[in-house]
Image (cartoon, rainbow, N blue to C red):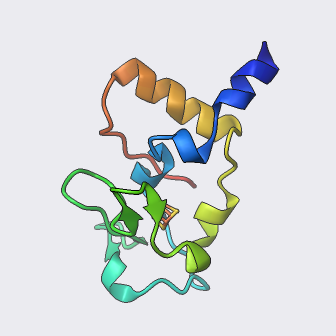
Amino acid sequence: MEREKQAKISCSSCDALCCQLTVVLEARDAVPAHLTARLPSGLQVMAKDEDGWCVALDGQQMKCRIYESRPIVCRSFVMGGPYCRAERDEHARQGDRNIALHLT
Ligand code: SF4
């Protein structure tokens, strides 16, 4: 059963839910400044569009436009891992895409 569930999770057929999360940048990230924003708390993050998606996401292809230089936190997000599964479950419960959580 768990194997079947795992097999259904794929970035190529995902709603890119992780690209709606708040992506906190680290000093060693090399993301173009125009794609970033600063939260009132002072944290530097990936900027979001009006619908809550990361501005680096190509919404047509559902692919990261800066994949080769994507932030460290995006690189460490494990497809099908516990956090991915938790987000997918929460998305299914809420029935919408307006989720915004910190990866940290
Ligand atoms: S930088 Fe790329 S991988 Fe990271 S949230 Fe934005 S679109 Fe997704």
**Quadrant where the C terminus is found in the figure:** bottom right
Q: Is residue 50 above or below residue 39?
A: above
- On the image, the x and y values in percent for residue 67 come to 56, 72
Which residue is drawn at the image coordinates 22% and 51% (left, top)?
51
Which residue is drawn at the image coordinates 44% and 41% (left, top)?
15
Nearer to the camera, 77 or 39? 77
**Quadrant where the N terminus is found in the figure:** top right
Q: Is residue 72 above or below residue 79?
A: below
Which residue is drawn at the image coordinates 56% and 73% (left, top)?
70
Which residue is drawn at the image coordinates 35% and 66% (left, top)?
41
Nearer to the camera, 98 or 8? 8
- On the image, the x and y values in percent for residue 14 come to 51, 40
Q: Is residue 98 above or below residue 67?
A: above
- Residue 91: quarter of image: top left
In this rendering, position of residue 90 left or right of residue 4: left
- On the image, the x and y values in percent for residue 54 come to 37, 61
- Residue 99: quarter of image: top left
- On the image, the x and y values in percent for residue 7 come to 73, 29
All told, the count of numbered labels is 0
In this rendering, position of residue 39 left or right of residue 93: left
Which residue in the rendered view is the most extreme toward the left?
Answer: 50
In this rendering, position of residue 17 left or right of residue 6: left
